[in-house]
Image (cartoon, coloured by chain):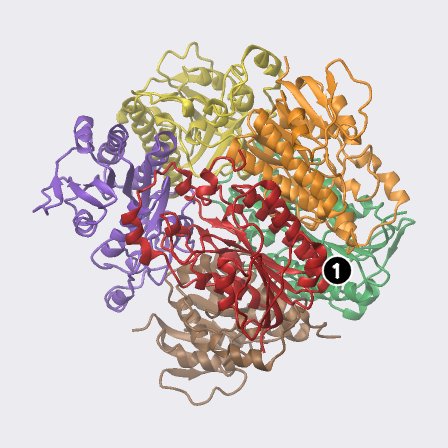
Chain colours: A orange, B red, C purple, D yellow, E brown, F green
Amino acid sequence: MAKFKRLLITGASGMLGGELRKRLTDVADVVRLSGRRDVGALQAHEEQMTCDLADMDAVMELTRDVDAVVHLGGVSSENTFESIMQSNILGFYNLYEGCRKNGVKRVTWASSVHAIGFYPTTQVLDTDVPLRPDSNYGVSKAFGEALAQYYWDKYALESVSVRIYSSFPKPADRRHLNTYLSFDDCAECFRRSLLAPVVGHTVIYGVSDNTVKLVDNRKSAHIGFRPKDSSEPFRAELEASTPEPSIDDKFISTHGGGFASAGHFED
Amino acid sequence: MAKFKRLLITGASGMLGGELRKRLTDVADVVRLSGRRDVGALQAHEEQMTCDLADMDAVMELTRDVDAVVHLGGVSSENTFESIMQSNILGFYNLYEGCRKNGVKRVTWASSVHAIGFYPTTQVLDTDVPLRPDSNYGVSKAFGEALAQYYWDKYALESVSVRIYSSFPKPADRRHLNTYLSFDDCAECFRRSLLAPVVGHTVIYGVSDNTVKLVDNRKSAHIGFRPKDSSEPFRAELEASTPEPSIDDKFISTHGGGFASAGHFED
Amino acid sequence: MAKFKRLLITGASGMLGGELRKRLTDVADVVRLSGRRDVGALQAHEEQMTCDLADMDAVMELTRDVDAVVHLGGVSSENTFESIMQSNILGFYNLYEGCRKNGVKRVTWASSVHAIGFYPTTQVLDTDVPLRPDSNYGVSKAFGEALAQYYWDKYALESVSVRIYSSFPKPADRRHLNTYLSFDDCAECFRRSLLAPVVGHTVIYGVSDNTVKLVDNRKSAHIGFRPKDSSEPFRAELEASTPEPSIDDKFISTHGGGFASAGHFED
Amino acid sequence: MAKFKRLLITGASGMLGGELRKRLTDVADVVRLSGRRDVGALQAHEEQMTCDLADMDAVMELTRDVDAVVHLGGVSSENTFESIMQSNILGFYNLYEGCRKNGVKRVTWASSVHAIGFYPTTQVLDTDVPLRPDSNYGVSKAFGEALAQYYWDKYALESVSVRIYSSFPKPADRRHLNTYLSFDDCAECFRRSLLAPVVGHTVIYGVSDNTVKLVDNRKSAHIGFRPKDSSEPFRAELEASTPEPSIDDKFISTHGGGFASAGHFED
Amino acid sequence: MAKFKRLLITGASGMLGGELRKRLTDVADVVRLSGRRDVGALQAHEEQMTCDLADMDAVMELTRDVDAVVHLGGVSSENTFESIMQSNILGFYNLYEGCRKNGVKRVTWASSVHAIGFYPTTQVLDTDVPLRPDSNYGVSKAFGEALAQYYWDKYALESVSVRIYSSFPKPADRRHLNTYLSFDDCAECFRRSLLAPVVGHTVIYGVSDNTVKLVDNRKSAHIGFRPKDSSEPFRAELEASTPEPSIDDKFISTHGGGFASAGHFED
Amino acid sequence: MAKFKRLLITGASGMLGGELRKRLTDVADVVRLSGRRDVGALQAHEEQMTCDLADMDAVMELTRDVDAVVHLGGVSSENTFESIMQSNILGFYNLYEGCRKNGVKRVTWASSVHAIGFYPTTQVLDTDVPLRPDSNYGVSKAFGEALAQYYWDKYALESVSVRIYSSFPKPADRRHLNTYLSFDDCAECFRRSLLAPVVGHTVIYGVSDNTVKLVDNRKSAHIGFRPKDSSEPFRAELEASTPEPSIDDKFISTHGGGFASAGHFED
């Protein structure tokens, strides 16, 4: 018997949702999938539900009979503030309200490196540095972490905020050599976040065991996440095919990379 | 000649706005006042403008030709998330966008104890503790501090986030003995925040020099704020007229007081 | 009406007990005094009771109907381990058991510099440095602080452990210039410890506002203790009448002074 | 030639004593065993001596010609204060006095998780957090650590205080998945504590390399202890046979587990 | 009788030397003055000696029969590396060698803000931040602090390294409003550094009690330095007569001011 | 294509230079070798140049067309101050000036355990502890780290200061069991320091993965150095052939070992 009866995965039609869905098969008896697009064929233990997170009534349905959540839904990159506010602020609030009212026990969700993206890469970050978001998107993740803390302190709803770095099939540029998170390691980070006996509200970095290490998960060791993969096998090819960035390029000199170095999104 | 040509005070028709308006007469040649209600008779150096912060175009007008801002506007207590989102999240974002586009140099604004309201009062807080909001309102202040940090890191727009404790004519309950901020000290905190030579994004606590001290502004000493007042003269009367709260009552055992101890706002 | 109905002062026949008894007249309606010797004439608000703290039954009587305690009793200097164990370990345990069973709300007590006496005087100590006792006596104070913490965590019995430095009528040697605690400041430290709204288990240093400052009470600012006196008026006389100690003499180079520099007590 | 001529193991007739005795065969030429019960057949390098630690004269005999100590004796679980005081306070003091007078060089001893048992399991502890004992037993361990520090500072007698978590043949409940210390790892921790070139007074956590990690031995890396075992092989069986504890059950939400959640021992 | 028999003041013909000489009349019976230029008429307790610090033999003479030193000599501003090396590195080494061989007890000396000049003024510095010099001059002060630490650790020669900010007759520019050290406060800082009972090697900031506070002497409170003066009386005039600097001008945005913002000295 | 076109290795005729030269063949297309003695036969990718670092003109030639530096030259052990000043202070300054003027991008260099040699071995050091040099040599390394920081802050010339412990063919004494740095690990530390994308000025400890661990490179994890070797294989032989040192012998009780325990070099 799994720890949870029903796990909700939001954003299940996205890339990361699809990968985690395949790997998180042992933490709940039933997995409910929701996403903006079709989630494809269902396995025996899966069910599906569509939901606009900005619609509170729909969210109440979505979170009914749910024990735990992997929340990957919402806008997943920089965008207009209006768009991000609807998905990642109002939608996020609705999700927590639904969870609270429906008695969900634990939410694990995709926070992001972009919540602390303006720190220089010469600073190895532990999990309680003050936030330095690098974008509207990053600010919405800062909002999310504050809300998750609030629901723990006030309502004893547990959360793990996973600050995902670069979770892709493989490292796609030189920065990813330092920030890569393999899908296996990503799934393991969420699995441990769900299975750890007590989490309160814990922040943890989601990065693989790359040679260059920009983060320090020491204060989250109670989660039990130990990454197994590394960007190293991809190094030679990436270094051969891409130019060395200048050290004053924020792309390589900040945790947030392209977000910190980009111009204003909406101009 | 004052440091700034034009200072904008939002929330000028509120209690705190009215008090600060009277006291911040030496930091700018012209003071622009905006508020939800009429701001009353204008002094020679004052001008007035009404503005709905949720209206971006109006905010562009409001912040035109402004050098510095004292932002007190928005919802100032716990409320529905929808209401708070419109005022303190969308409205706050609009204000910063207006400031950025209009070249405003510095924003000082009313963050709140409620951004860190769930800390116990046995813990003296310095200015870089992780946030622990106690309400929708407190979460909106956490959002605001993250946005202020972002606009500094990305756009070199300076901010001081003043975590105001209890700014009232006089302490109104026993908790206020520990959290009182006199209007004079409040104004001095904003004045120093405006006049300090360089602030980047600085967080500072706004509390008078009360006997019981719950905060530590050591890391913000570059602002130069030294409170002069104390709740002590009000102690005897308050203790005579109010019962001793129990130490397990969050009203007295947390920084946030009533917010941390209240039930859910919207239920 | 005072905050407490009945305050128990132990060690009331000792020097410090006599001084505090005269000064702590406003925190309780009735003050119960206990001591090894006669406590002298009683004031109207005072009552007296003799008690051997090593006798659990007697301690139950002593703490009955008591709301708060100022515990100064026990062995107050270095002694044989056996003697210290009876008074400061068994007696201290009995006192806490009596307080727990009788529903006492708060204990404030004389811990000591000798709990951290082996730190060098070039290190300014805050209140959460690991303990470094300098004597059997200091070890018994370390025991006491651990027990006070335990009764808070387990039974919600509040305590303030006051690490008293040198509380004498006036500084008696050159070390006291750095460690002097006037009786007025000592009483004020206990008063604030009793009156502070919430204390959990708080450790605080009891030292006057001397020029040379060896401790940092920053993390105990919620107690509200601000010393008013200083050893400075006694400096000239003391320096004229005593030789400059060598910097490698533990008497002057450690917090604990003579205790740290003494030979083994029982040899 | 081993590092020490004679190693004393107290508590040698207990479970842990028996296990360590089998494994610590290479740190001394002769091992002296003492215990409350018979220690069984002796190996060639072993000798045996019975001793009541509360008897100072006997302890002088016990520690004569000894170079180093593994102290496992005393009361090993919660008990009446009187009983714990005789064994773990007076007995412990006698042991240190014996060691001091007989010129023993180093004492390694079984402190306990219960010296810091009231910390929440969401807080990963390093070795200099303030103590938070969870029982009379835990308070006696706090006493022991203070005494060990004192004998180092005053008499240059070295100590390693090993805060043992759950050293059993195998994890016996769900909490042990997080706190398990295999006998091999326990022995290795004591071996390294004995063999490390200089230790002063060092505190170290005794826990195996479990997935969920509640402690951080970073500041004790000079001891050289690296656990090899894990509770992971026992997880499936334990989770199948035991119910998931509630996160507000101190059994799982504090380091000390059952001790922190228990009622008062002596009532 | 003063604490020291003979105090040596180097750099006595400079501005600061002249000011301290007038004020440090009570710490030694005899004051020996040395400087590059004539030191003017001598008081009864004064004697004079000329010395090139780069000449080891001369330094041996200079430090003979000396008990304590106020070292202000050497190059006092940015210069060629060769020049600074001769005065502030070789000369400084010679001074310490002379002191060691002649049994001098304590050296207090003018380190500088320029040893940490590249920190931003939004960071309030305590005394153990890693060094960030802003010039050849600042690097020589970093060297000096390292040497002072070495002579304490190896030879028990005590030192206080006073990181002087801007010690001038009055603040001369807007940066000085934040960095001003009055001559009285400067003298008091050296006096306390000489009179404090034990100092080992202590680093302390020399700044008056200005409104804007860039440093935190908390860890040096055992010196007993409490500044009395402030730049505030000079503010109005300075702000009226000088333009507001831009916040991206290192002159105002770094501790080191002009040094950090200057081009390379020797180009 | 390697990251750098031309790498300069100074001290190439020394033991460590010879070892690194053999191992750092993949970070640059051309390696320029300089040393006091002949560097032996050149490989195809190598070139050689002799240079006295105290001669600025020669250093300008040496650093022309160079992209990165491994600086091992200078005096490599305790010596007269004069000798160390010429090589490690003036020579070091010249090297940085040459690098700055010739546009070198990154310098990695042999700082030393002796910059922090006076810390006790019971203290595990991270990379931002205040310096405590143990010798003239160690003070020159402190100077070097300050200069490296300065050139990064002022001129954006990157540096990695590698605090090398004991880099020898194999551990030669008992202290080396704790401080050994194999040549392979040493080369890997420099390789990672050269290849890491951004380093600013980073301090890192160069020690192998020995059982007893005296340092903590956590804050330098962005370099990506993970040692592979250990002193363990050499333990048995070393312990058999050398006596156990006393714990009060600075040789074993300080990081710096023999340097901290030696008498004054020049007496």
Q: Quadrant of the C terminus of chain C?
A: top left
Chain containing the residue with disc 1 = F
Please count the marks in the image: 1
Q: In this picture, is D240 found above or below E104? A: above
State the residue at coordinates (36%, 74%): E28
Residue D172 in picture, x, y percent from top left? 51, 14
For label 1, the crowd category at 10 Å Cα-Cα, with few meaning under 14, some 14 to 19 and many 20 or more, is many
State the residue at coordinates (25%, 51%): C187
Q: Secondary structure at mark 1?
A: loop
Q: Is residue D187 visible?
A: yes
Residue A67: which quarter of the image?
top right
Horizontal side of residue C119 vs D124, given as left or right: left
Residue A199 in picture, x, y percent from top left? 57, 30
Horizontal side of residue C166 vs B251, given as left or right: left
Residue D56 in picture, x, y percent from top left? 27, 27
Q: Nearer the viewer, residue B78 or C148?
A: B78
State the residue at coordinates (82%, 22%): A40
Horizontal side of residue F140 vs D260, given as left or right: right
Amino acid type at image mark 1:
Leu
Residue B37: which quarter of the image?
bottom right
Q: Which residue is mark 1?
A: F157
Q: Is residue E126 visible?
A: no
Residue A230 in picture, x, y percent from top left? 76, 34
Q: In this picture, is D212 found above or below A42? A: below
Residue E249: which quarter of the image?
bottom right
